[in-house]
Amino acid sequence: MLYTGKGDDGTTKTFGCCDQRISKSSAITEALGALDEINSFLGVIKTNPGAQEMVVFVANEKKNISEIVGEVQNKLFIAQAEIAGADKHLSKEDVQSMENIINAIEHELPPISTFFVSGGTQLSALLDFARTLARRAERRVVAVAEEGSVSVGRETLAYLNRLSSLLYALSRQVNHKSGITEEPPVY
């Protein structure tokens, strides 16, 4: 059944709350919703034909953007489970793996000397928009961690912080490999 009607009063239940129900406007549900939002939008990116064609070389391993995004989506499910109170956690290796991808991309790109206006290619703009969603999810998870109602692992916080960097690096790389010159803002 796709609905139960139990949330009609504005409450929901998570793994860690046993039979207790929490408000759908709580910091936990806001964080879970923001993580769900970025994960869903990454699905849009993953199915983009350009994401399936654009390749990144990490430690002599070739991955396309769709594969990288798919790995991130699975890690975000772990983060969601952790926020919901399950005994699931991201690891130092998860953070390191993401850093390796970011570092590999960064070696291919010109150095950053300014902010850039989003756009260039459609895929680059989608990745940049995903970066903003990732930042919002990170802020929501940090709020849960600060509230203390759920213990949030350091690795989860680090992973979410790196996620926006990964998406920014991928956005820049797509434009770079497409021959698009990054456009600085005009103040």
Image: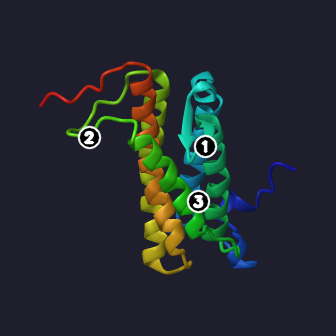
Q: Is residue 133 visible?
A: no
Along the line of sight, the residue nearer the viewer: 135 or 54? 54
Q: Earlier in the sequence, mark 2 or mark 3?
A: 3
Q: Is residue 145 visible?
A: yes
**Label 2, on which residue?**
112
**Label 1, on which residue?**
68
Q: Which mark is residue 117?
A: none
Residue 107 in the image: x percent, y percent? 39, 42
**Disc number lying in front (1 or 3):** 1
Q: Please give left or right for residue 181 compared with residue 98 in the image.
A: left
Question: Which residue type does callout 1 highlight?
Answer: Ile
Name the secondary structure under disc 3. helix
**Label 3, on which residue?**
32
| Residue situated furthest right in the rendering | 1
The residues tagged by marks 1 and 3 sit, at their Cα atoms, a distance apart of: 22 Å
Q: Are marks 2 and 3 in contact (CB under 8 Å)?
A: no
Which residue corresponds to the image point at 70% horizontal and 76% vertical from the top-left? 87
| Residue situated furthest top in the rendering | 179
Question: Which residue type does callout 3 highlight?
Answer: Leu
